Image: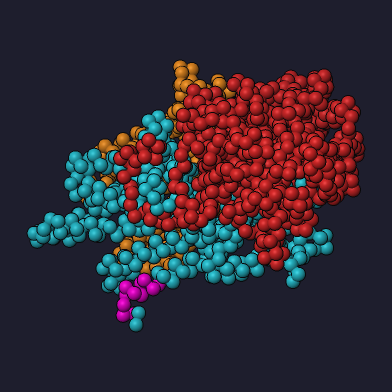
Chain colours: A orange, B cyan, C red
Amino acid sequence: MKLFLNLLKTPSFVFGVTLFLATLGVALVLPWFYDVDTVGRAGTPYLPPSAEHLLGTNHLGVDFVSLLITGLRASLYVGLLAGCIATLLGTFLGVYAGYKGGWIDDLINLVTNLFIVIPYFVVLILISASLEEGRSLQLIAVIIGLTTWPWTTRSVRAQAASLKSRDHIGLAKVNGCGTFQIVTLHILPYLLSYVFMVFIIQIAAGILVEASISMIGLGPYDSISLGVLMDDAMKNEALGDGIWWAFIPSTILITAVVFALYTLNTSMEGVFNPRLRK
Amino acid sequence: MLTNHPTLRYIGSRGIWYLATLIVAIAINFFLPRLGTANPVDVIMGKVASGLSTEAAKEKEEAYLKEFGLVETNNLGEIVRDSESHPIKASLLTQFGSYLWMTLQGDLGTSFLNYPKKVSTIVAEAVPWTLALQFPTIVLGWIIGNLIGALAAYKRGVVDGLFFPLSLLSCSIPFFAFGMLLVYQFAIIWEFFPATGGYANDVMQGFTWEFISSVAYHYTLPFLSIFPVLAGGMAIGMRSMAIYELGTDYIKYSQWLGIKESRIVLYVFRNAMLPQLTGLALSLGMMIGGALITELIFSYPGLGTAMLKAIEGNDYPMIQGCTLLIAITVLIANFTVDVLIGILDPRVKAGQAL
Amino acid sequence: MTKASAKMKNPAKFLFVGALLGCLVSCGGKSGTSGSAGQQERTTFPRAETLYLAGFQWGAPNTFNPLIDQPAWPIYGPPFNLMYEPLVLYNTLSGKMDPLLASVHEQTADHISVIMNPAARWSDNKPLTAADVTFTFEIGKRFKSAPVSYVWDFVSKITVEKVADPAGGGGKELEKVTFHVNKEKENNQLALLNILKSFQILPSHVLEARLKALDGNFSELQKDSMDKDPVVSGPYNLHAYSPEKIILERRDAYWGNKALYGGRMPQPKYIIHPIYKSNDHFSIALQKGDLDVNSNFIPRIWLKFKSGVGTWFKDPPYFEPGSIPMFTINTTRYPLSDRNYRRAMAHAINYTNVKELAVSGYSPDLNPGLILPFGNEAAYFSAEDAAKYGAGHDLDRAKQVLADAGYTSIFKDGKLDHMENAKGEKVPTMRIRSPAGWSDWESIVKIAVKDLRAAGIDVREGFCDEGLYWQTLPTGNFDLMLQTPEASLSPALPWSRFKAVMASRNWKPEGEKMNENQGRYNSPKGADYNPRVDELIQIIPNLANEEAKKAAYRELNVIFMKDQPALPVVYRPEEFYDFSTKHWTNFATKDNPYAPPQLPCFGAGRNMLWEIKPVQ
């Protein structure tokens, strides 16, 4: 509780939270007040911004504000889902490897390295080819989660390894606690704040990875995400024709979300680790 | 003997585990693309079959299957068929065996999609560009980022107040979006820099002034699109590490002892650097895959696009060649860092587990 | 001051020169270069003498060997004629075969004969004769894996005889080569004409010697990249190449300069095909004048006119239409097997939206049927039939057709939820397959799906990776699929388009591969098999009487419109053709039609090379 009050006193934390809530508002609350239509033809292709269409239209004549709202929602969804998967899986394996050490640690490290060695788009293309529905937004989120957990594992493992020589762990062992019990009751609670910070970073990573996947042309078939919007802009030659509203607003939105999350992360680091504060 | 040398033992054990990782990775990269129903010849046939009769198309398809070693053949080199005269697919294990044997001899095989070009030729043409763009950018980004981070941590105050949010912002912008903005502003609106390519189209590759200056001129925008993201990320990491180190007891003790300021900074820097080295290794390992989007945005030469096409077209030898290369770079980069840590980190010397 | 030296003044160049360049410089030596020894190696190409052309090469060049299926530009593709040349040039403006290595002499239902041009020479100054022609085609007989091998389904034999010059020519004897129609197999002289314009004639004296040196191992010969001083007959030869570009250099001693072009040489000394990785880079390069002539799809071309870009027509549709992208329908799957369902789809799609939004208006209004109402096919088009039998855009009609056939569409919140048939069963959702990332095609599918759903037809987008797309096309493992059958112009059109969409002579069930009629229309084993379709496809190529031909085409087109086995959506040019006048002028246009709207590396489009002028 005291920590939380400390957080609220940190200006950068307040800024991060406000910015993040603002983007959430655009994605979730704005649709109540704005007629979101991502299918209908609102005007001719690439209409410049006007009173009627605040950010113009895209290459199919669809209203860009609608597209950005829908895209932001999809990107946040991917970030959250991928972040959850990567954090849960990564934390569990990291804590286990760090606590156990020895050959189990080495084996988990091998698997971790494997996921870093095999490019995610190999996995993505191969899996989506075998599914009737093709690449859905959900599938992309799951695959991002399943390929980004090694980063969590690496950092959590180091933390867990440093915890395991502490006295209370030894005490628990002497009292006959099993590995599972020690990990969940005696190690994880100490790492919670750290894991939460990792989770925030993983959300940001999920959003960025989704955007780059879409830029390669491997984006979701069934949804509009911010990455898909940027890919559309590039493919339909918005750059060459100077149609800035096709790519600058989506760039700003992605940057704002990621910046908010990074700010949150670093401000929390400052509070949880008092030495960083000053 | 090794037991007496904790550092050597540590390095040796890491080496063995990395070798094991490489072997598993090679096997996965071989079997994964072949698990699906997709067939590399289908993509080729889609492009060459127009105008052929169904019968002629079938003959052509079988000729390809045979040439690529995807069907069983007998001693006379004829395709072995089942009772309905469909060709029998070559077994995966046989293919894996011959792949391993060829790889050990340094032969990466012939690309299906770029037939009859050798995979090694394609890789040799493209990889220098990827390395030339990524390697200096990553190393420079790492050095500058660490310097900024260390400076911000040490000085705090205004320097920190300026550089920290800037670093945070620069690593929040997706680098490809930043690249697009650069192209839009500097290549299309102002026309200061070329929008595409690794060098001008009217120049031949060679050791000439025209070529070298043209490469440098075309290098600017791609470099600028990756550099700030990298440097920003590194600066943030370095900053929190360094602040942490600055607050540790041994630094306070050194200050109390009156050790020179510059010497203390050096200690701090060295200790904060160790985790940063891992970051460097990972960035270097991700070079080839990471270059893909830069290639697409700037039409920059490199291996990324060739690899993407290979995966989409089930060009097995090309996929295997690229993934092998990636696996080796990632693992070598990691191993090098482990060796460095083994040498630099006192805990390893003391025989402690990390 | 040349462009290169002007650039050197830019200080930005000095920013990043470093050791890293070493590896690029060293890999430069690996790219193939040709050119005789002792000749000084060129490192830059003067802009005023170089034509930049793009649209045919997408990745690093693989080989320049004409004996395999897909070598690099300018060997493989629409019959290119800059290095190796075909016997004749197809002129898409006149629909005639222009003479090149030979001229068409006689054309009957049994055979086509050509007279060789006695002036034709190889670059090693050996004459190009009928022996080279027979060698080129006989390769297909000797080696099954040669691209030319399928020719023998259409040709039974090739004979050579000496004849007196038909033009007089002072009693000189010329070679006449006769291609005899293969009556037992394809029996199709239209396709034979296509073969004459498609296959490049190869130097028998060079290749025969190479083959002998390899002990007749053709597979080894196919692996030779043939990039070192190849012996060619065309006006250009390979100068150098790398993964970034292919460079051709003019052959000043080209035989055709004197024999065909009044002693003039082509204007560009070099032709460079740059290789870009993303579509929008062609557009940027064209606007900047870094590219002179291009065949890639560029949206909103009219915005580029102010930067000196030009097209065939000054006004919409800007390009000459030549093919029909269409949704191929799997007619064996329910509900697509129901003709009413297919007709309802045809009524539902707003073709004007498709044209304007997906292809930037580069298409005239769509007419029902498989015959283009303009160009060389117009003679067979009947506006009366199209109005009577065709299904044009009409939303109310679409709903009416569905209702009459017993379908009910259930909408929820204004959006289509599902469909039910007369028995009250749910009708399955159909998907339109199209390669992800082909931006104009993606748009076509999205617009069509929107219209279809608004009409109450349960269809969805089914984007997939290119690999899967090509894999499922021949096996029929799809509901609907966007494709362009017969994309390149040929004298066999529109017959070859009908064959590609409707022929069921080689009908195979779903799962087995079919190289035509992938929608499995008109199964010979089906209850409602219509033998007339195959009959018409069989007889049209050999109909000599134009009236009879027109009647047969009309009948076939009416069957297509009534049955709707595919959904044409828009027209597309054979190849896009746009150019920049910043460095070269006098490109052919509708107002200056001295050459057809083709890039100057294939067909009669090559004539532009002799006519364009550098900007001083």
Q: Position of residue B231 (x, y in %)?
A: 32, 47
What's drawn in magenta, residue-wise?
B3-13
Residue A157 shows up from this direction: yes
Q: Position of residue B145 (x, y in %)?
A: 29, 49
- Figure quadrant of the C terminus of chain B: bottom left
Residue C580 shows up from this direction: no
Image point 54% across, 28% down: which residue?
Answer: C585
Image point 39% across, 65% down: which residue?
Answer: B335
Q: Position of residue C113 (x, y in %)?
A: 82, 42
| Residue C474 sits above or below residue C327 on the image | below
Front-most of C79 and A158?
C79
In-image side of B152 versus C334 (left or right): left
What predominant SS class does the magenta segment belong to?
helix
User: Residue A174, located in which quarter of the rendered image?
Assistant: bottom left
Image point 76% across, 61% down: which residue?
Answer: B87
In-image side of A237 versus C191 (left or right): left
- Figure quadrant of the N terminus of chain B: bottom left
Image point 81% across, 41% down: which residue?
Answer: C171
User: Residue B184, located in which quarter of the rendered image?
Assistant: top left
- The outermost residue toward the top is A51
Front-most of B266 and B104?
B104
In-image side of B11 versus C124 (left or right): left
- The outermost residue toward the left is B258
- The outermost residue toward the front is C170
| Residue A126 sits above or below residue C110 on the image | below
Count of numbered tags? 0
Q: Position of residue C66 (x, y in %)?
A: 66, 51
User: Residue C54, located in which quarter of the rendered image?
Assistant: top right
Q: Would you say residue C102 sits in the magenta stretch? A: no
In-image side of C282 versus C137 (left or right): left
| Residue C172 sits above or below residue A171 on the image | above
Q: Would you say residue B5 sits in the magenta stretch? A: yes
